[in-house]
Amino acid sequence: MSDMDVFAAMGIAGFGKKPKQRQLDPNRFEKNKRTEAGTPASAPSAAVKAEEDAAAQAASSAPAASQPKSEEAASDSEDVGPPPPPAGAQEDDGAEEPEFDASDDDADDLQLPISHELILKDHTKVVSALTMDPSGARVVSGSHDYDCKLWDFGGMDWRCKPFKTWEPAGSYYIHDVKFSNDGQQFLVISGTTQAKLYDRDGEELATYIKGDPYIRDMKNTSGHVAELTACAWHPKDPQTFITSSVDSTIRIWDVEDKRKQKTVIVVKSKERGARTKVNACAYSPDGSLIGGACMDGALHMWQTKSNFVRPSMTIEGAHAKGTETGSLVFSVDGRTVLTRGGDDTVKLWDLRSFKKPIVTRPGLATLYPHTNAIFSPDHKLIVTGAGATTKGGKGHLLFLNRDTLETVRDLEVESTPVKVYWHSKINQILTGLSNGQICVLYSPDMSVNGAKLPLNKGPPRKPTVEDMSDAAAAPTIITPHALPMFRDSEVGRSTKRKREKERMDPRKSHRPDLPVTGPGRGGRVGASATQHVVQNLVRDTTRDEDPREALLKLAATADENPVWTAAWRANQPKPVFAPVEDEGEGEEKK
């Protein structure tokens, strides 16, 4: 017999008052639904149209119920019926086949989470760096407005604002950000020579050293001597990461050692000067290979167990010379490499026959050098962005077939997509746009948490009289130039909740004790019984003593037993002073 049966037999329905549960709006995701033609958003419009046709037919067929069966069958064959009748359903499918079935087939076959979108707008310039932590709870973005921003889906409200914004390197662009595999820290790569490490809350942990720019041999410098371009974490070792730079090196770092790198990979070019810019770097999934894409068009691969004197595999002219390769990505099996070049191409390479690309897709407009390409979580598709053809025009997010690089789905977005990130755990696609927006594509059915969390919180609560009285009783003092430790939280954000939390804290809500006078009061002993004891524990009497008298006490001892001036008695002349006459004697002589 279960516990609930026992409670029912005893007449107990429950314990205490049942908490009131807030009912969420079932149509809360509809306002974020994409309405672009060709996406799953076109299916509901067809369904609504079919329902309207069905209602119209039902209204017209009601007065004609007394007609013969032959006429009724004829009218059914002419008019489109509601979905339940088989004949009407078949004709309806046939009528709407080019639009309705195509979108359904795409949604069923591809399983793309692109039916809804959430816009995160806080940057003012192009979003040049974008990543998420492994759990899919937080987003780190970097931009050409010099700012890094931390977004938390769980703590975000309907305004969709970041919970922290800071400038990692002053007036330098942010080139790359990467979360570690455990999600506890992330790297920020800016236009400076130094990489910076932060914890997941945005607090700086380390700034790695820069090298000596006057040393010609790059192996003898402790760090990079030119602008950084990209970074990558080791897939197996959370204490190791690599950085690439314009100084023609890829450096392997230990997280704990910020004074010097572990190893230097000097990239040698066939160009004059034997140097080139390394634009992208990456680890293979098993950590056995390090890949680098260079400005001279070459693509290099190094074995991590080698001495890095020369690459184990090289392709000269993988991309056009003088163009910046935006990304270098390994497939999950470690056999295929995907590159997004600045020459408007996407190329797939097979490491087993590393001579020419398997397939090439040209004609993808590249307006920003950090434009990347990624694999989908199932590795059946490749996602990349194509720039707008006109100034201020729409950009295109392309879903390409991995085998042929043919366009499977072309998604139109507000402006040029630069960074794309598809998180496999929450099944949502983040796209950093050139207008400073971050577009989060998701599906209420296929996606988990992420962009769905702010909408699950419901609409904001209307302010009450108590809220207004609290605000009037405790006005906010704005101090924009205060130090971070003394700076209050953002004005108008969670101040009431903070006050309620402090009210529950016994230490913060405790009133300071009033001074006690007399023998004692309220269980506390007065100052008359305790003050002299406390003052005599450590008593400093130097303030109460005359310094001249203190020195004259030692005058007799110094004359009897001089320690430092004993030799002066033998070789110093004895002073002879003129006699002092009294004033009375002087007047008598006159």
Image (spheres, rainbow, N blue to C red):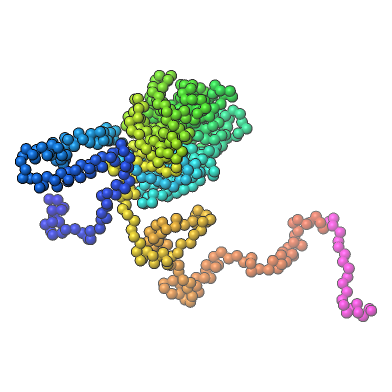
Give the number of callouts. Answer: 0
Q: Residue furthest right?
A: 590
Q: Position of residue 418 (x, y in %)?
A: 43, 37
Is residue 572 one of those drawn in magenta?
yes
**122 w.r.t. 544: above or below:** above
**485 w.r.t. 150: above or below:** below
Q: Position of residue 504 (x, y in %)?
A: 37, 61
Is residue 517 one of those drawn in magenta?
no
In the rendered structure, the answer to whether residue 191 lies left or right of residue 215 reads left
Which of the 4 image quadrants contains residue 103?
Answer: top left
Q: Position of residue 269 (x, y in %)?
A: 54, 23
Write the start and end of the magenta stretch as one range: 570-590
Image point (77%, 62%), residue name: 559
- Relative depth, front residue between 283 and 450: 450
Residue 87 in view here: yes
Pick the quarter of the image with the C terminus.
bottom right
Image point (16%, 41%), residue name: 82
- Relative depth, front residue between 507 and 40: 40
Image point (49%, 25%), residue name: 320
- Relative depth, front residue between 120 and 521: 120
Residue 422 in view here: no
Q: Position of residue 77 (x, y in %)?
A: 13, 36
